[in-house]
Amino acid sequence: MSAPTHTRPPRATRGGVDARLPWWALALPVLAFVALLLLILNPADARAAAEQPATAHLLERLEQLTVR
């Protein structure tokens, strides 16, 4: 004789998803975004800004990567 098994339904069907992230999972992307935003807002600190525009440099790097 087999005993009945009691299985719990998945969490999603019991009233929603209960996902918890650690504090740094939100803090690190926010910190990276703020750092990049500060770099964009103050381009005078960038040494190479006077030499070439950023888009031209980016296109040159893309071209170098595709040639390989």
Image (cartoon, helix red, strand yellow):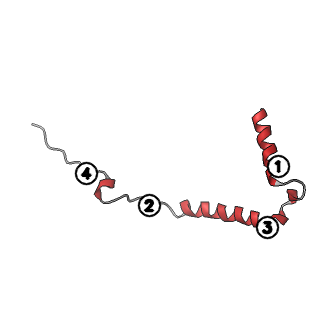
Q: Nearer the viewer, residue 66 or 7?
A: 66
**Image depth: mark 1 or mark 3 in front:** 1
* Quadrant of the rendering where the N terminus is positioned: top left
**Image depth: mark 1 or mark 2 in front:** 1
Residue contact at pointers 1 and 3, CB within 8 angstroms? no
Q: Residue at x 65, y 62 (%)?
A: 33
Q: Secondary structure at mark 4?
A: loop
Q: Amino acid at mark 1?
A: Ala
Q: Is residue 20 left or right of residue 31?
A: left
Compare marks 4 and 1 and give the one earlier in the sequence. Answer: 4
Q: Amino acid at mark 2?
A: Arg
Residue located beneath label 1 in the image = 56
Vertically, is 52 above or below 24?
above
Q: Position of residue 57 (x, y in %)?
A: 82, 49
Q: Which mark is residue 20?
A: 2
Residue contact at pointers 2 and 4, CB within 8 angstroms? no
Q: Which mark is residue 8?
A: 4
**Image depth: mark 3 or mark 4 in front:** 3
Q: Residue at x 12, y 38 (%)?
A: 2
For the view shown, which residue lies furthest in the top direction? 68
Compare marks 1 and 2 and give the one earlier in the sequence. Answer: 2
For the view shown, which residue lies furthest in the right direction? 51
